[in-house]
Image (tube, helix red, strand yellow):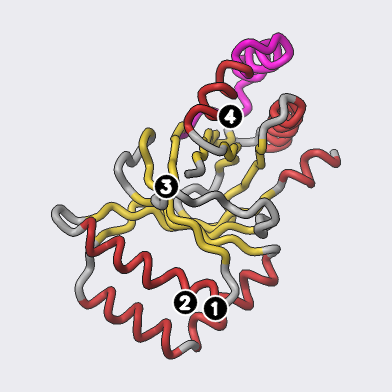
Amino acid sequence: MGVVSLHGFRTEPGRLADHMAASAEGLGHLRRLGLQAVTIQALAGGDVGTIATVVNYADHAGHTAAVQQVLGDEQWQEFWGRVNSDGSSRYEESAVFEDLDPDHQPSPDRPMGVLMAVQWRPHPGRFAAFLENVIEAVPHIERLGGAPRAMQSLIGAHPVTVMFSTTFADLDAYGAYADRVARDGEFQAFWQKVMADPTAEPVRSGLYLNISDQLLET
């Protein structure tokens, strides 16, 4: 069962360059400490204007151990105190997710250039039916070229919701996938069935670019 933490910050007007620089420095510290961290920037959706750091852990014990490691690191504490006073961004979100499948561990070579994500709030009494739809959706998405992952929010702005993300190598791969989805009869039939009897409603949707390499090269 994988665990993911997400910390999102909204850029203050006119401070994008400073926010990007702070994000790059923070990412460097996390990777120095051995964490599987990436930085993502929203391209479309309700999170546009934010930059988030996402960290993957093998389990909850790994997450809590990493938190203690970061909090005890003097270089991180100096960095954190400094960027919190520079005013280039403000805290937007802090969340923790775990895989719905307790046996799931994401492949280390999964594509992470672009992420498409929809966070769903199941309707009362419909969680089991919603999970059936998720299970049915996975082979369709994989067949069409996406790498899906379903996680439940334990802590954050939308607790007990389900984050369904699909990752791609880059924007070209995402665009090709989106075109295939729009033309695929099997997927469209599945989606029409789901929409005819909704089991959940979206609370967030977005398209996100992994800017980690770009940040670390600057």
Cβ–Cβ below 8 Å for labels 3 and 1?
no
Residue at x 35% of width, y 86% of height = 189
Q: Amino acid at mark 3?
A: Pro
The answer to which image quadrant residue 78 occupies is top right
The foreground one among 78 and 143 is 143
Residue at x 51% of width, y 62% of height = 148
The question of residue 89 being in magenta is answered with: yes
Residue underneath mark 4: 89
Residue underneath mark 2: 140
Mark 1 nearby-residue class (10 Å; few <14, some 14–19, many ≥20) = few
The stretch in magenta equals 70-93
Query: Left of 35 or right of it: where is 105?
Result: left
* Sequence-first disc among 4 and 3: 4
SS label for mark 1: helix
* Sequence-first disc among 4 and 2: 4
Cβ–Cβ below 8 Å for labels 2 and 1?
yes
Cβ–Cβ below 8 Å for labels 3 and 2?
no
Q: CA distance from mark 4 to mark 2?
A: 39 Å
Which numbered dot is residue 102?
A: 3
Mark nearer the viewer, 4 or 3: 3
Which numbered dot is residue 143?
A: 1
Q: CA distance from mark 1 to mark 4?
A: 39 Å
Q: Amino acid at mark 2?
A: His
Q: CA distance from mark 2 to mark 1?
A: 5 Å
For residue 7, above or below residue 101: above
Mark nearer the viewer, 3 or 2: 3
SS label for mark 3: loop
Cβ–Cβ below 8 Å for labels 4 and 2?
no
Cβ–Cβ below 8 Å for labels 1 and 4?
no
